C-alpha cells in the first residue's frame, strides 16, 4: 500500500486566525468611541442585509478574555486583529482617546499572557465618519490624519507588537466604497476621484511602513495585505500559465507596482489619461519603502486560458459550478497557489502570509448543539493543499490565518453569512466551536493537513 501523503508544512510555519475590529468588537459607543463610516452606512436603508449594524457584533469588547481563552484551547498561537481608528481618535485626528488606547493595551497584554502573538492591522475599513465628512480617502488630509494615528499606535504598542499589517484590501475599501458604492461610505465617484483615492490609500500604506520603521523597535516586521484578482490557468501548460499571469498582472499592477517597483505602470496611466492621480514629489518613494512580507487574502479566482495570440480569456462558470455560500465565492482551491506563484514571479516579495482564507454559510447548531460544518473543513483542506504545494515548490509562504475565528458582522451581508470556525449565537453571545475549529486545531498542532 503506498504511503499516505503527509502534506506536512515547514518547521515554524505560522498557524493563526483572523478578525477585524468593526466585525467583532461591538460596544460602538463605549469609552468615547466615535462613529465610523460603517456605523453610518449600515443605518442607511437597504445598505446592509436585514438592516444589521455592527453596534453589538460579537461583543468582543467585553468578552475578549473568553475569546482568547478559546483561541488558546484551540492551540492557535497567532492572532490577526485590527485597531479601531475611531476608538482611538473619535474624530479621526487630534488628541488620542486614553480609554480607547487603554483597551488595546489590555487586549495585547491578554494575548501575550496566553502565549499568543498579535498581528496588528492598522486599517481595516473603519474610517472615522468625521474624516469622511471632510472628503475621506478622496482627500490627502486623510493620509495626514492616518499618519498621526499610525505613529500613535506603533509608539504605544510597538514594545509588544512586532508584526504589523498596514492596510487591508485597498480594492475593497476604495473600489467598493467609492466606486461601486456596495461598501461604506457608499459613494459612486468618477474615474478621476477613484484614481486619486487609490493613490491616497497607497500613501497611507507608506506612512504605516514609515511608522513601524521609526517606532516599531527591534524585530518589527510590516507588510501590506491585498486581495488580488487571481488568474488560474485552465491547464498547466505554458500558454495558459502565461495568459493567467498576464491577466493577474493587468488586474493588480495599479496597486502592486507602486509598492514593489516604485512607479505606476505606463499602461495604467495611459488608460487614465487626464484622470491620472496627482502625485507629489516623494510620494512613490514613500509608497515603495521595502516591506517584510505581502499578506494575501484569497477566497476565489478566475479561470483563464490562452486565446488567439496568447491573449487571456476568462472562462464563464457554468450554472452548476459549486459556490461556497455567497454569489461571488465559487470554489477555486488552486487560486491560493497561483496567487503566490504569479506574484512571486512578478514582484518577488520577501515572504507571503495568507492573512485570510475561509468561507461563509448560513448555519446553526443541530439538536445536539454541534455545528458539523464538513463543507468548511473540505473547503479549507483543498486550499491548504494548494498552500502546501507553494511551500513545497520553494515559494516563501510563512503562515496562514483562517478567516475567521468568530462568526461576525460580514459587512454588507450583515450577520446572515457566517465565516467563523466558532459559531456565535448573537442573542446570547454564546460561543460554540464548530467541527472546523477542531479540525483546524489538529492541523495546526500536527503542522500538516489531516
Image: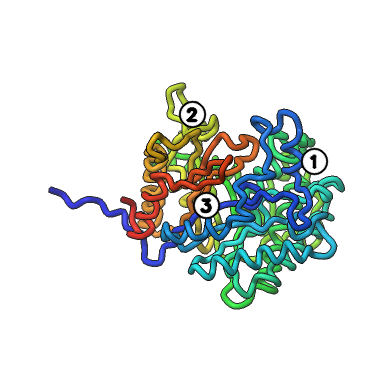
Other residues around mark 2 within 10 Å, as few (<14) / some (14–19) / many (≥20) = few
Location of residue 321 with respect to 438 vertically, above or below: above
Return the mark for residue 270: none
Residue at image position (69%, 71%) is: 156
Image-quadrant location for residue 110: bottom right
Q: Where in the figure is residue 242, as x and y percent of width and height? A: 47, 43
Helix, strand, or loop for circle 3? helix
Location of residue 259 with respect to 385 vertically, above or below: below
Distance CA(mark 1)–CA(mark 3) = 27 Å
Q: Provide the residue designation for mark 2.
A: 315
Q: Where in the figure is residue 133, as x and y percent of width and height? A: 85, 45
Residue at image position (67%, 65%) is: 209
Mark nearer the N terminus (2 vs 3): 2
Residue 304 in view, yes or no: no
Residue at image position (69%, 44%) is: 55
Q: Where in the figure is residue 291, as x and y percent of width and height? A: 60, 64
Residue ranking furthest to the right:
134
Residue at image position (76%, 52%) is: 200
Residue ranking furthest to the top:
319
Q: Where in the figure is residue 22, as x and y percent of width and height? A: 66, 49
Q: Is residue 20 left or right of residue 391?
A: right
Mark nearer the N terminus (1 vs 3): 1
Return the mark for residue 343: 3
Q: Are marks 2 and 3 in contact (CB under 8 Å)?
A: no
Location of residue 379 with respect to 202 vertically, above or below: above
Distance CA(mark 2)–CA(mark 1) = 30 Å
Q: Provide the residue designation for mark 1.
A: 192
Helix, strand, or loop for circle 2? loop
Amino acid at each position: 500500500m503506498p504511503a499516505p501523503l503527509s502534506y506536512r508544512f515547514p518547521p515554524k510555519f505560522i498557524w493563526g486566525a483572523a478578525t477585524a475590529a468593526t466585525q467583532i468588537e461591538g460596544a460602538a459607543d463605549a469609552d468615547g468611541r466615535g462613529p465610523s463610516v460603517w456605523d453610518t452606512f449600515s443605518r442607511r436603508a437597504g445598505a446592509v442585509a436585514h438592516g444589521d449594524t455592527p453596534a453589538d457584533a460579537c461583543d468582543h469588547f467585553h468578552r475578549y478574555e473568553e475569546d482568547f481563552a478559546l483561541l488558546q484551547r484551540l492551540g492557535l498561537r497567532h492572532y490577526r486583529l485590527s485597531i479601531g481608528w475611531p476608538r482611538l481618535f473619535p474624530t479621526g485626528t487630534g488628541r488620542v482617546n486614553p480609554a480607547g488606547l487603554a483597551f488595546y493595551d489590555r487586549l495585547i497584554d491578554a494575548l501575550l499572557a496566553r502565549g499568543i502573538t498579535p498581528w496588528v492591522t492598522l486599517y481595516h475599513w473603519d474610517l472615522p465618519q468625521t474624516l469622511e465628512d471632510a472628503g475621506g480617502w478622496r482627500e490627502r488630509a486623510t493620509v495626514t490624519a492616518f499618519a498621526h494615528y499610525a505613529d500613535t499606535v506603533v509608539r504605544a504598542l510597538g514594545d509588544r507588537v512586532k508584526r504589523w499589517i498596514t492596510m487591508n484590501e485597498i480594492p475593497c475599501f476604495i473600489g467598493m466604497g467609492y466606486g461601486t458604492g456596495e461598501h461604506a461610505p457608499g459613494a459612486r465617484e468618477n474615474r478621476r476621484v477613484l484614481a486619486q483615492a487609490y493613490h491616497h490609500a497607497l500613501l497611507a500604506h507608506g506612512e504605516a511602513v514609515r511608522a513601524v520603521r521609526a517606532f516599531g523597535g527591534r524585530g518589527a516586521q510590516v507588510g501590506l495585505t491585498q486581495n488580488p484578482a487571481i488568474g488560474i490557468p485552465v491547464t498547466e501548460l505554458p500558454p495558459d500559465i502565461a495568459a493567467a499571469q498576464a491577466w493577474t498582472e493587468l488586474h493588480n499592477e495599479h496597486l502592486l507596482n507602486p509598492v514593489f517597483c516604485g512607479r505606476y505602470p505606463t499602461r495604467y496611466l495611459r488608460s487614465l489619461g487626464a484622470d491620472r492621480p496627482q502625485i507629489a514629489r516623494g510620494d512613490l518613494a514613500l509608497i515603495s519603502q521595502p516591506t517584510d512580507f505581502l499578506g494575501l487574502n484569497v477566497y476565489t479566482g478566475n479561470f483563464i486560458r490562452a486565446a488567439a495570440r496568447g491573449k487571456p480569456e476568462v472562462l464563464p462558470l457554468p450554472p452548476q459550478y459549486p459556490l461556497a455560500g455567497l454569489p461571488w465565492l465559487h470554489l477555486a482551491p488552486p487560486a491560493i497557489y497561483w496567487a503566490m506563484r504569479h506574484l512571486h514571479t512578478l514582484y518577488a516579495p520577501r515572504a507571503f502570509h495568507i492573512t485570510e482564507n475561509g468561507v461563509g454559510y448560513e448555519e446553526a447548531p443541530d439538536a445536539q448543539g454541534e455545528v458539523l460544518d464538513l463543507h468548511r473543513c473540505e473547503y479549507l483542506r483543498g486550499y491548504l493543499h494548494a498552500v502546501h504545494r507553494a511551500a513545497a515548490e520553494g515559494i516563501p509562504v510563512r503562515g496562514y490565518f483562517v478567516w475567521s475565528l468568530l462568526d461576525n458582522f460580514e459587512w454588507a451581508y450583515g450577520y446572515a453569512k457566517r465565516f467563523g470556525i466558532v459559531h456565535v449565537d448573537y442573542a446570547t453571545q454564546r460561543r460554540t466551536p464548530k467541527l472546523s475549529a477542531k479540525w483546524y486545531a489538529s492541523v495546526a498542532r500536527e503542522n500538516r493537513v489531516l
